[in-house]
Amino acid sequence: MNDFTQAIQLAATLIGRFDPELRGIIALSLGVSLTASALAFIIGSPLGLALAIGRFPGRQALIVTANALLGLPPVVVGLGVYLLLSRSGPLGSLGILFTPAAMILAQAILGIPIVVALVHRMTVDLWATYGEALLVDGASHIRAAASLMNIGREGLVVAFLAAFGRAIAEVGAILIVGGNIRGYTRTMTTAIALETSKGELSLALALGIILIALSMTVSAFSHMFGRTLRH
């Protein structure tokens, strides 16, 4: 019990003085996850929109696939990206394995299905409500799509936040492709796993507290924008 109390006190001290190592890990985590979430959003939102308003062969199969990929195991994604970026892989010449770029790629792949699924679900309802009216008014499909995105901007924010929530909490994939290198690819989740395995609970607790606070903030914003969207 004394060890646990001491670990909590040390964790509070680390947070209170914003320890340099703690600060570096948090900055890297946020940088990687925000970049990955932005990439997932840029790629996933047009795909979700196309699946909602487009009519083309194989559309239903793509919708099913996008929803099935929501449960994609992170370690499998990590393994796939590792093989892709390894020296013998097709992108090995880039030399980005065990770098933040590889971690961003892995997190973006995990976030894309989330964005596609959420944007598709939102846009299907909006298209059913406003799509015909927009086309009758003379808008092209591209302009109609832009109008739908403007109407559903709160839903787009929810999709981005959901991708960010998945990215910031990820450990398996980025551990494989990032290597958990101190000061370079060590994020909050990988640091928590490492420090816990070493029995060094103070830094792990400090990072865990901050990670929970971030997750709660993301959930609160998602709930707020979700309620706005429903109303």
Image (cartoon, rainbow, N blue to C red):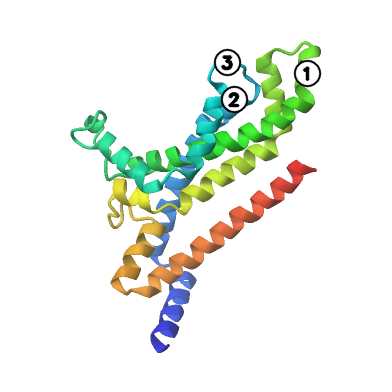
Residue 165: where, in percent of width, then height? 53, 50
Q: Is mark 1 on a helix, strand or loop?
A: helix
Of the numbered discs 3 and 1, the one sitting upstream in the chain is 3
In the displayed structure image, the side of residue 125 where residue 67 appears, left or right: left
Per the image, the residue denoted by label 1 is 132
Q: What element carries label 2?
A: helix
Residue 226: where, in percent of width, then height? 70, 46
Q: Which mark is residue 191?
A: none
Give the amino acid type for the residue marked by disc 1 in the picture.
Glu
Which residue is outermost to the left?
A: 88
Per the image, the residue denoted by label 2 is 51
Residue 195: where, in percent of width, then height? 33, 68
Of the numbered discs 2 and 1, the one sitting upstream in the chain is 2
Of the numbered discs 2 and 3, the one sitting upstream in the chain is 2
Q: How far apart are marks 2 and 3 (CA)?
A: 9 Å
Badge 1 density bin: few <14, some 14–19, many ≥20, Cα 10 Å: few
